[in-house]
Image (cartoon, rainbow, N blue to C red):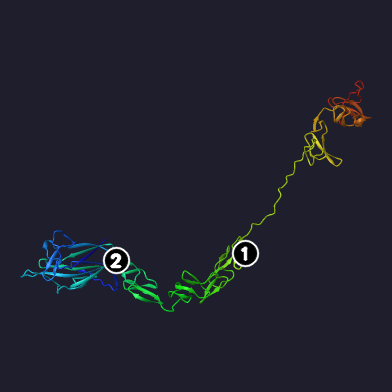
Amino acid sequence: MRTVVLAFAVLLLIQTGASKRVLKVFKELTSPVEEQHTWTMQPEGLPKVSRCENQGAVLGGLVPNSQATNVRFIKTFKLPTPNAGVLVTFDAWIMKKQLFTRRVVCNPDPFTTVSPKDGQLLGLSQGRSSILFGPQSENFVMTLQLNPNEPISRRAYAVKNVVIEVLGCDESCASCKDFQSCATCPQFAVPERRGNDTICVCRKGSIAKSKNPLVCVPEEGKCHESCATCSGPTRRDCRSCRQGFELQDGSCVCPRGTFLNGNSCQRCHPDCVDCTGGAADQCASCAIGATIQQGRCVCPAGFKVKTQSPVSCVKEEPRQEPKQEPKQEPKPIICHGSCKTCSGAGENQCTSCFDNSVLVERNGGKFCQCQRGFFEESKVPLKCKKIPCHFSCKLCSGANENQCLECHPNAVLVEGDGGAKTCDCPPPNILWETSPNYICNEKYVKYEDCLLYTSPSPRDRQKSRMPSSA
């Protein structure tokens, strides 16, 4: 809701140059006698209608001096559309009570002046006045405020013949934005600014067939250069096209794969699907898989060329690596029971031996056998056990006297039948003792008593001190 105040001491006169369309007219206080009306007066209780002898009934008039401040007459008018303008036309009078005859007359005041002040007009224009308001909401509230400049007992202001015209935009508009501007224009017309208003005029290449309402038609023979026939002068008004063009939504355009070169369509470079020119670096779109780089159609990384004209691309297949057979782990070797580690399963393929046995080479192979002083307790697995040899043996393969492997000093190893090996003390050596010490020597020397014996027989022994060199 917007309130408009007409203050009869200050009026703003507005001129309008456009041809407004009148949507509705309200007329108030036009009859000679206004006994009833719908104006509201503030403050209440004052007379709404006065009479002038020469003008009949008027709104306003003489009231007591004590009630003469800010007298207002208010009325709301329902407009048919929002954003409309409102042109108010009225007759403004000065009411005077003649001093001697006491008659009340309404006449323009010849002494009222109009002079600029703060951008407005001070004073009251004489006679009929018009004021334009807008745009308004659907409820237009008009307030007439009477503020006399001198005692109301002698003179006052009054209004009569109020006409309110509801204005739309210019007659040339197809639809209105507000009372001063077109929202849309008729076919072949364009908006144009005229002062504070926007109107519609026929565009270039068309003429007005009628002005109210505005109807524009194309001038004869004024088709766009791309059209063969048309309904208007622009490229969007084509009905059919010249050779080489095709019709799309009223426009004649170059078909796909061509570009406009002057007044004709030329083919794109073979690499392109669409283009802006005929060169290979003027592509606008590409075939499947290709992308535009610096105006050219190329295959991106991971793609390869499928076709050349136009360039299309397919995804490269991943490179197939040769299939590798799983590495065969060597089967573990089960060694012979005499070997600790081996290079094969044979008895002669030992590489290391168990405790108390040693690795020996024989007949091109490597065997494990018990070391000297030990004999085989078992063959598989090989277990070597140390046993006391016969007193005649230094090293042996068994506990018997015929199982010697090595003899004490001065004794010799004698091989007998069946592989028997014994130790014998040959002359000139004499077997002085057998057990626990096997002594085979020419002389018997016992250092316990530092005595030297020359014969093994006790009665033949000669005791003597050993030489100092002994």
1 or 2: mark nearer the eye: 2
How far separated are the C-alphas under marks 1 and 2?
66 Å
Near-viewer residue (449 or 211): 211
In the image, is 62 to the left or to the right of 5? Answer: left
Residue 371 in percent (x, y) is at 82, 34
Residue 191 sits in which quadrant? bottom left
Residue 44 in percent (x, y) is at 15, 59
- Confirm whether residue 31 shows in the render: yes
Q: Amino acid at mark 2?
A: Ala
Q: Is residue 192 above or below residue 2?
A: below
Q: Residues within 10 Å of mark 2 (few under 14, many from 20)?
A: many
Q: Residues within 10 Å of mark 1 (few under 14, many from 20)?
A: some
Q: Is residue 372 above or below residue 19?
A: above
Near-viewer residue (134 or 255): 255
What kind of element bears circle 2? strand
Which residue in the protein does label 2 denote? 84
Near-viewer residue (223 or 75): 223
Q: Amino acid at mark 1?
A: Val
Residue 352 in percent (x, y) is at 78, 39
Q: Quadrant of the C terminus?
A: top right
Q: How many marks?
A: 2
Q: Which mark is residue 305?
A: 1
Residue 469 sits in which quadrant? top right
Q: Quadrant of the N terminus?
A: bottom left
In the image, is 179 to the left or to the right of 219? Answer: left
Q: Is residue 250 above or below residue 441?
A: below
